[in-house]
Amino acid sequence: MYTDSLLRLLNVAFYIYSRTFSNVLFGVEVSIMRRNTVTLIKYAICSTALIASGLFLLHSIHWMKIHPKSLSQDEVKLEPGQPNPNLIKVFEEILDKTRPVVEKKDWHDYKAIEAEQAQQGPGEQGKAFVLSGDEIDKKNELYRNNGFNALASDKISLQRAIKDIRHPDCLQKKYQKFLPTASFIIPFHNEHLSTLLRSVYSILNRAPKELVTEVILTDDHSTKDECKQPLDDYVKEHFTNVKVVRAEKREGLIRTRLLGAKHATGEVLIFLDSHIECNINFLPPLLEPIAANYRTVVCPFIDVIDYENFEYRAQDEGARGAFDWELYYKRLPLLEESKKNPAEPFANPVMAGGLFAISKDWFWELGGYDPGLDIWGGEQYELSFKIWQCGGTMVDAPCSRIGHIYRKFAPFPNPGVGDFVGRNYKRVAEVWMDEYAEYVYNHRAYYRNIDPGDLTEQKAIRQKLNCKPFSWYMAEVAFDLPKFYPPVEPPPLAEGEIRNTGTNLCIDTKYKGGNERFKLETCSKEEGGRGEQQFEFSWHKDIRPKNRKICFDVSQSNPKSPVILFDCHGMQGNQRFKYRVEAQQIFHPISGLCLDCDPETKEIYMNPCDPKSKTQQWQFEKPDLEALKKDYASPADR
């Protein structure tokens, strides 16, 4: 009602104003104007004042929208700092109906893209680079110091081209013409120099120059010589908007990020790791949601740079971040609406942690990272929870893709003392998770006895920002998380040994690791049996060794397809199995095959299902037959 009245008033003013000036310009009814000059001038002055008042009101509305705590609280009884919901609704309606069309542009640098596509050489176009056999000794030495093949990195150009693997819809997208500027913050400790510099070049070469304020390399007290003067010299010689900031002592990842943020002058902070490569046109998709709402945090799609050969490839085509109740990072499947719009940002409950963009103003309003978090661990939960609970939003931008090296192993010790990760998790749980912290303590009982330190300042931030309870977060943001990661885990569908009827032998994974195969062995209950033979057909509908988070995984659909062990992801797919109670077959819906074995070699594999084959008959030691029958009758994705 208020909105329509204001619009009608503005329309009347614009009509009077336009009629007045049209009369003056075209000489129509000049005689009338001469007789009513005073009247017309009054109309003009009044309409001008009215328009000015309307514009002032709209500016005031916009100001109050982004500073909701200053809204009038006279008409509604509100808690201190709580915005008036009635005014908010009116303001939103007015802004929605009067918001001007935002001018957009194509930010692609087609000349640079064409030049990159012509580049040839080792690792170019994101291809794998394989070292020669006579370089193994040097490779191994650098491998030990870095956790990846640093010699391969040295052989590849610092400004190599990588393939554009964005969804085709991204190639057509336009973004706002006026976007905020960005400061890139890259924390590092003893990073291999060529890998660090390639990260910097990928930013500067693939981001619009007018949007990049600076790249801040924040050194967490590195001890490698190449990370000291050689880095300073290279930066001074080759860059104009890159600077190195150094910690006076080892601080750890979290406080090193804070150090870089304190030196940033851009409107948006973009946190990246020190072993990344940004893909084509990665920056505008990160900035546009923030330009629309400064309380929006944006994460790119994270691709994989192979730690062995530096091949650039996709990790997947999107998922939503989540956690289980031991606070391990997990992922949730995309919602159907997001699948229909593969180039559009979608809401993300939890960031992966290392790569994201956030308004500098919003970051510091939130208090930055909790400075009480030590070294690393828990920071992605702390920031994700308070972004959502304190009035912000967080999205993934599918058209912004950045490759990341996942190290094979951590090459240097952490400087923390004791269980700093557990202490960090306790701080996050105590400040942000309310009664849901009890579920964490039920899974990690020893957390109850950890001293989280002084939480006064963090709880004050939560109160000052009038943040919502964690129950709201679980209901509105992570609403389907309990379906995939329930706070109280349901019992398994079956457990114990898995015995093959045709051979009277048992599956034995022998405590093997990821990507390894396993065989049949003498059952533990029989004479001479030993190894790892206790399994769970878990509520995730996967099969895993008891008390381990590694699962049976099948990625092929050919006869004798291998069964390997792979980290449990809870997303079903290659790890989804069903049990046919009557036929005693372990069925794999994705491949359409059944678990089989070779009595001679004791090899385990998948084969076309044959209900008469004894080698395809398997018995669980402790099955819940009704639950197994119900599961087999359900769709494969449940």
Image (spheres, grey):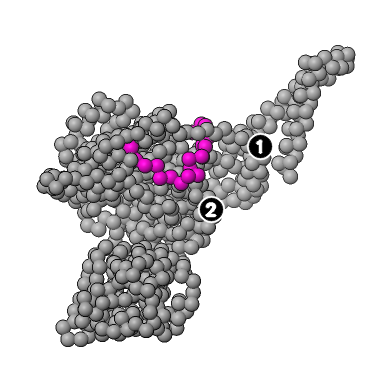
For disc 1, the marked residue is: 98
Q: Is residue 316 left or right of residue 597?
A: right
Asked which secondary structure carries label 1, the reply is helix
Residue interval drawn in magenta:
161-179
Where does the image place residue 242, in percent across and percent down from the top left? 31, 30
Question: How many marks can you see?
Answer: 2
- Position above or below: 40 against 86: above
Q: What numbered label is drawn on residue 340?
A: 2
Q: Residue at x 52, y 33 (%)?
A: 105
Residue 438, percent from left and from top: 39, 66
Q: Residue at x 82, y 14 (%)?
A: 27
Amino acid type shown at disc 2: Lys
Residue 253 belongs to magenta span: no
Instruction: Tell which of 112 and 179 is nearer to you.
Output: 112
Amino acid carrying mark 1 in the image: Thr
Asked if residue 436 is positioned above or below residue 317 in the image, the reply reads below
Q: Does residue 367 appear in the picture of this structure?
A: no
Look at the image and say whether residue 167 sits in the magenta stretch.
yes
Q: CA distance from mark 2 to mark 1?
A: 30 Å
> Residue 25: x percent and y percent?
77, 15
Foreground: disc 2 or disc 1? 2
What is the quadrant of the N terminus in the image? Answer: top right
Q: Residue sitting at 31 percent across and 76 percent down?
A: 596
Q: Is residue 69 left or right of residue 561?
A: right
Q: Does residue 513 show up?
A: yes
Q: At x 75% / y 39%, what residue is drawn? A: 5
Q: Which mark is residue 313?
A: none
N-terminal-most mark, 2 or 1: 1
Residue 469 vs residue 100, the one in the foreground: 100
